[in-house]
Amino acid sequence: MKRGVFAFALVVMLATGGCSASAGDGDLADDWGAMASAAPLVPAASACYDASSRARDSIAPKWRSSLPCTGNHGVETYHVGEFAASITQPPADGDRDYRTAFEDCEKVSKTFLGGEWYGARIYITVFVPTKAQWESGARWYACQAMETQNVTTSLIVQRSGSLKNALASPGPLAHGCTNVVGLKETDWDDMTAIDCAKPHDAEFAGAFIVPGTDFPKDDQIESVLDRCWNTIAFYMGGTVDGIQAGYIPFGLVQKDWTRGHRYVRCWLWSDDYKTVGSAKGKGNAALPRG
């Protein structure tokens, strides 16, 4: 069993409003009833929008400027929920009510995507009303999904077509076999997807969730990431002590953690040579050379 390479990838919400006056007799009270308050804006589910360049930036879409999901877009709203009436202010990132909303988004995402978001180049997040929107009566939270170019940077892909059922069958979005880019002693830059039948040095084995609400302390991180050994052993159908490879993890990004992300993703890593074929179910046998 070999040590792993540790890798850590590492809102602005604007509200505008205005009013205008019309000409009249200067005494509206005797002619006009009270003007009804405008209903608060509620984002539409199954709507798509332009997006900032990085999913991790979490800049809210322009809710009044939705785009057809069949055309070019960067982010998709796949679910809109509602906060309990007892909540008195818009939850901030990391608050209990924010985490509850994210957990709902995460649960719904599996049905929407047809698979687990963390097993693919997908980033999910949740937006809540601005303070001004909240004061006008808005109580929604909007669940967003984005395709990203890679694992580490969260750069958004401008795509056409909905992400609905995008993970229901094998496809290019799902993590699989890959070659590690920019590998250093304790870090790496990115991964390039490749057919498992071709020589490669890493393969996605799964993910595990980190329990609790407190971000792990520095002296806890290595032991947390070492749970990847169990994930890989399960994927290979072998034992931890018999694994003849290393691992590469990704997770524990502070900004993502604050927004609700709790998963660490694990890649089986062949550090000595390129391998061919999938390692799934191969037990503790040595990986075939490419």
Image (tube, rainbow, N blue to C red):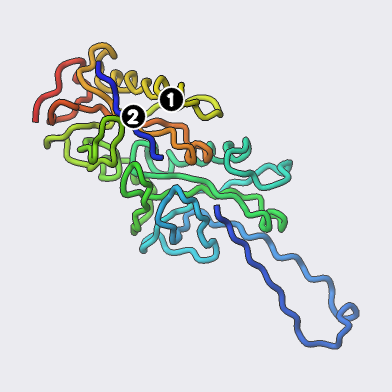
Q: CA distance from mark 2 to mark 1?
A: 9 Å
Label for residue 165? Answer: none
* Left or right position of 194 against 190: left
Label for residue 221? Answer: 1
Sequence order check: which comes first, mark 2 or mark 1?
Answer: 2
Residue located farthest toward the front when viewing the structure as drawn: 185
172 or 53: nearer the viewer: 53
Q: Are marks 2 and 1 in contact (CB under 8 Å)?
A: yes
Q: Quadrant of residue 36?
A: bottom right
65 or 170: nearer the viewer: 65
Q: Which residue is mark 2?
A: 6
Q: Quadrant of residue 204?
A: top left
Query: Image height check: is 262 above or below 162?
Result: above
Residue located farthest toward the right when viewing the structure as drawn: 30
Residue located farthest toward the left when viewing the structure as drawn: 290
* Left or right position of 49 against 270: right
Q: Residues within 10 Å of mark 1 (few under 14, many from 20)?
A: few
Residue 82, image x, y percentages: 62, 46
Mark 1 residue type:
Ile
Q: Residue at x 25, y 19 (%)?
A: 2
Q: Quadrant of residue 97?
A: top right
| Element carrying mark 2 | loop
Quick one: quadrant of the C terminus?
top left
Query: Image height check: is 226 above or below 140?
Result: above
Mark 2 residue type:
Phe
